[in-house]
Amino acid sequence: MHFLDQAKIYLKSGAGGPGAVSFRREKYIEYGGPDGGNGGKGGDIVFEAVAGLNTLIDFRYTQHFKAKRGEHGQGKDRTGASAPDLVIKVPVGTQILSEDKEEVLADFTEVGQREVFLEGGLGGRGNASYKSATNRAPRQHQPGIPGEEMWVWLRLKLLADVGLVGLPNAGKSTFINQVSNAKAKVGAYAFTTLIPKLGVVRHKGREFVLADIPGLIEGAAEGAGIGDRFLGHIERCRVLIHLIDISGTGEQDPAEAMRVVEEELAAYGAGLEDKPRLVALNKLDLADKELAEGFTQELKAAGAQEVFPISGATGEGVEALMDAVLQYLPDRTNTETKGNEVEDIHGDDVDDWSPLD
């Protein structure tokens, strides 16, 4: 399964059915009269957040959604049937934006959340409704009211409790593989992670969702590297883990690496710069403790409040970092699974996965 977090779609609710023009003509009945019924209501466009979806890939292939129109009114005062609503299922975390992306029209944050987005048109009046003492045989009727239509953008922000940020090659993929059930790609080159990756962490009887996003480089806010387009997936995280390479294989020393990422988070905005931060000096297995202590003091002098020397490869120091993460989560953060298995965003089967608390 491919990952897609933005899609532009066209929506049109159903038009109302026209009213009927009909007159009663029955054998052995002396008096007739108008008996045209009203038209049926057009179908609404309804969005519903459902479990088990974590990508907008379906909207790449289906981009036009049109609800059916209501049925015509009929004689004998029969009202036309109303059209069924068109229900569009989206992943939890989906936002609906205006065509210019300037306004958030809807935000789906819970499973089962349902919203009528465009209402179908009302059915037109039949000629029976125009009958009066002075207009005994009306022939006028009303066409159905047209449906509403618009182009919108769908934007997916994955729901996770903890976000993982850092420069490329900081060891984020190795780390998420170490602490969760994720199977992220690991390689000795930059940008092995090209799309966000989710994993469920189970630590001391608690469960929470960890989100790994592609690495940030200087100028990401202006589009450098992969840019900052995936930062939206950590906007709703409760705490961020900033992973920094201690081994010296990166281009910057730890303090400079922290500065670069922090400046990109601040440039993106959306409150990311104000989120609690846990700084982790990764790849401790490639450095001695004296160097780790020196870099820890340097990072604290640069503004880091908590620094955890860890090794994502061996697991050293990871437990203390996970203990610190739990302090920022609710008393009981637990993932719930509707079935035995669900697919992650790469299409691999992962047991007991859910992006929800």
Image (tube, grey):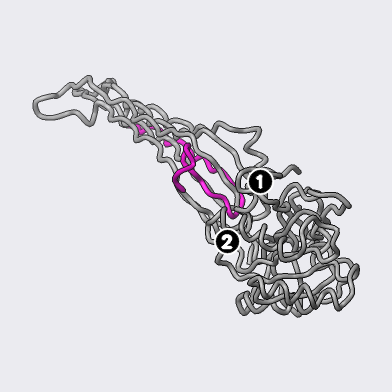
Q: Find residue 88 and report its horizontal and vertical position in percent.
A: 56, 43
Q: Pinpoint residue 221: horizontal percent, then vertical percent.
A: 61, 48
Question: What residue would you read off at disc 1?
Answer: 227
| Vertical position of residue 126 compared to residue 217: above or below | above
Q: Is residue 88 left or right of residue 165?
A: left
Q: Nearer the viewer, residue 338 or 299?
A: 299
The answer to which image quadrant residue 315 occupies is bottom right
Quadrant that contains the N terminus:
top right
Pointer 1: residues within 10 angstroms few (<14), some, or many (20+)? some
- Residue under circle 2? 272
Query: Which residue reaches farthest left?
Result: 134
- Amino acid under disc 1: Gly
**Is 85 covered by the magenta stretch?**
yes
Q: Which residue occupies 85% across, 49% down?
A: 189
Q: Position of residue 214 (x, y in %)?
A: 73, 52
Question: Could you say where residue 29 lies in the image, as x and y percent from the top left?
Answer: 23, 24
Q: What residue range appears in magenta?
A: 78-105
Look at the numbered disc 2 and give the secondary structure of its residue: helix
Residue 62 badge? none
Residue 150 as seen in the image, left or right of residue 27: right
What residue sits 58% from the left and 67% below the top? 275
Asked if the magenta segment contains residue 7, the reply would be no
The relative height of residue 70 versus residue 297 in the rendered view (above or below) is above
